[in-house]
Each structure stands twice: as structure tokens, then as C-alpha cells.
Image: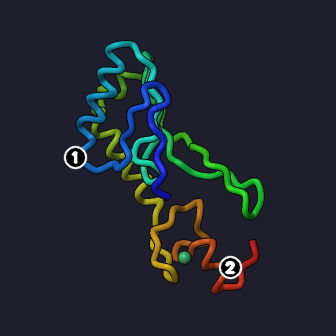
Amino acid sequence: MEDTIPCFECDRDFPSAKPEELRPFADWIRSARNQGREMRILYGGAKGIYVHSNSEGLELRLPTVVWHGPHDPEPSLMIWEKLHWNEVDEVGLENLLAQALEARRQEFRRCRFCREEVPLEHRHDDRTCHGCAEKYLGVVH
Ligand SMILES: [Zn+2]
């Protein structure tokens, strides 16, 4: 779950999504904007957010998976917010990033069996991951 993908444009990586990294990350988005550079990055890996920035605005997505079969998940992204720069400036870029990270954080719950922090897309219910639902609840996926 800790895999990260570096920026698709510049190869820079922000793997951890720690609060203290939010400022440099926001600065980096702003400098890309000022240079008219397009930027796409998964910030913080599977627990983070995907940011797509271009000259018009910012698109924020949350990681998820698409299930092609019971055991065939494909990583995917779900749109969380799409804003023009004037709207971003109203809210504040750091605020917006923090809100998106919080929204993603809230998708995680601890499995009552294996005690792992598991995101929405890998859970059977609020307290059980898919693996443990099969193992302990007899759920067949
Ligand atoms: Zn579990």
C-alpha cells in the first residue's frame, strides 16, 4: 500500500504526505503554475492524493481501484474536486490540499481482524478488510 508514483512530468517524488511537506509541495505546484508547466503527481502514494495542475486550474483526485473481477483490482483515480485558479486562490492552495488529504485519510479504517489500516476500496465493511472477510466471515468474493 505504500507504493508511490513520481510526478509524471518531472519525476519528482513526494512519497510520505506528511503535514510538514505540504508547504514545499504547494510551493512546487505554484512554481509550476507560474512557469505555465503542466503537472501530474500522486502525492503520498495510496494514502495520498493525485494532483493535476495546468494553466487553467487544479484537479484533485483520490486513489481507488476498479475491480475487473473478484481478485483483479486495477489502480484508478476518482475526481474529488476540480477548480479554476481563481477558485483555488479563494480557498487557499494549502487548505485545499489538506482537505483532500483528510478526505482520503477518512476512507481508511482499521480492520478488526488483521489490524491493518485499509481503504474503502479494499474493505468488505467498515471494520473488515476483503481478505479477512473471506478468511473469518466466509464471504466469497
Ligand atoms: Zn483484515
Q: Residue at x 50, y 66 (%)?
A: 118
Say which label, 1 or 2, has the lower sequence index: 1
Residue 47 spot, x, y in % from top left: 44, 54
Towards the viewer: 29 or 120: 29
Q: Quadrant of residue 83?
A: top left
- Name the kind of residue labelled 2 in the image: Glu
Q: Dot 2: within a 10 Å radius of its alpha carbon, few (fewer than 14), some, or many (20 or more) residues? A: some
Against 103, residue 35 (above or below) is above
Residue 60 spot, x, y in % from top left: 46, 37
- Assign ligand 1 to one image quadrant: bottom right
Towards the viewer: 1 or 80: 1
Is disc 2 placed on a helix, strand or loop?
helix
Q: Residue at x 47, y 60 (%)?
A: 107
Residue 129 spot, x, y in % from top left: 57, 72
Q: Residue at x 62, y 74 (%)?
A: 131
Q: Which mark is residue 20?
A: 1
Quadrant of the frame with the C terminus: bottom right
Q: Quadrant of residue 2?
A: bottom left
Residue 130 spot, x, y in % from top left: 63, 71
Q: Residue at x 41, y 42 (%)?
A: 43
Towards the viewer: 86 or 40: 40
Q: Which mark is residue 134?
A: 2
How many numbered markers are drawn?
A: 2
- Name the kind of residue labelled 1 in the image: Glu
Q: Dot 1: within a 10 Å radius of its alpha carbon, few (fewer than 14), some, or many (20 or more) residues? A: few
Task: Judge whether residue 83 can be spotted in this image.
Answer: no
Against 23, residue 89 (above or below) is above
Q: Is residue 26 left or right of residue 71?
A: left
Task: Judge whether residue 35 can be spotted in this image.
Answer: yes
Q: CA distance from mark 1 to mark 2?
A: 39 Å
Is disc 1 placed on a helix, strand or loop?
helix
